[in-house]
Image: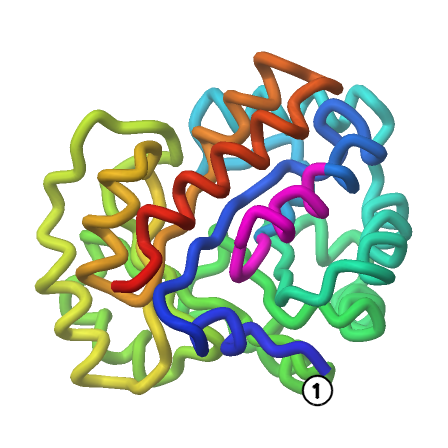
Amino acid sequence: MIKVKEAFQNGKAFIPFITCGDPSLDVTKEIIRAMDEAGADLIELGMPFSDPIAEGPVIQEADLRSLNAGTTTDKIFDMVAEVRKTVRKPMLFMTYANVVFHYGIERFCARAEELEVNGLILPDVPFEEKEEFASICRKHNIDMISLIAPTSHDRITTIAKNAEGFVYIVSSMGVTGVRKEITTDIPAMVDLVRKATDVPCAVGFGISTPEQCRKMAEISDGAIVGSAIIKIVAQYGKDAVPYVRDYVKAMKDAIRGL
């Protein structure tokens, strides 16, 4: 059984995000394989939702393109089943509570376990309300990934103590998106997490360049990148695969040896 924690066993982890079904599930399948070949350590699979409150315009538009193309939860599961024949890296789903509720929490988690997708991120579920999902996730060997934001303050230690898989440190206030610079005191957040748990922590939101990636990975255990990759997909559409592969390779190369 593949585990999320495997992503952090060989040095700093690079974690790319892709919106499933943008521009099509066939292209998503190729992109996941390309990310794997380019050195991604953990692949975050976005399940599109019509009201993704944590996402900026880039990923919102990707979600709409995917939904308009007819992407459904079952079609994503079928696509992952195909990918899993060759890709053995850890993978996780990132979506919203309504998607999982609508499908059925038990049914969703059972299918994810079957596909060896052993992580789930639900950014609209607060820590205090996560047990409804987390209890079923645990039953199916799925790590429900906790997010820690700059506004978490006194809750950081509590969230970290209960973390599974890895702790997702949100680098900036607001929604996802490319940023020129990241000004949050990430080292202080990482320090609080590490005092509370041995679970790895990775930084996401706003990272787009190899330099930013290296800087965040130096501070933490890995870097997460989404919007910058989705921008490439938006620009090149069905021809995006080699461009995404080159981008992921450049980002992974930036953190090798740390």
- Is 37 covered by the magenta stretch? yes
Q: Position of residue 256 (x, y in %)?
A: 34, 58
User: Could you say which is closer to the camera, residue 42 or residue 22?
Assistant: 42
Query: Can residue 95 be seen from the camera position used here?
Result: no
Up the image or down, 37 lies above or below 31; here it is below
Query: Can residue 221 be seen from the camera position used here?
Result: yes
Q: Main secondary structure of the magenta part?
A: helix
The span picked out in magenta is: 31-43
Up the image or down, 10 lies above or below 32; here it is below
Q: Residue furthest top?
A: 235
Residue 178's quadrant in the figure? top left
Q: Amino acid at mark 1?
A: Lys
Q: Position of residue 2 (x, y in %)?
A: 67, 77
Quadrant occupied by the N terminus: bottom right
- Is 154 covered by the magenta stretch? no
Q: Residue at x 54, y 59 (%)?
A: 121
Up the image or down, 91 lies above or below 45; here it is below
Quadrant occupied by the C terminus: bottom left
Coloration of the structure image: rainbow
Q: Secondary structure at mark 1?
A: helix
| Residue behind mark 1 | 139
Judged left or right of residue 165, residue 174 is left
Q: Position of residue 75 (x, y in %)?
A: 89, 44
User: Could you say which is closer to the camera, residue 22 or residue 252?
Assistant: 252
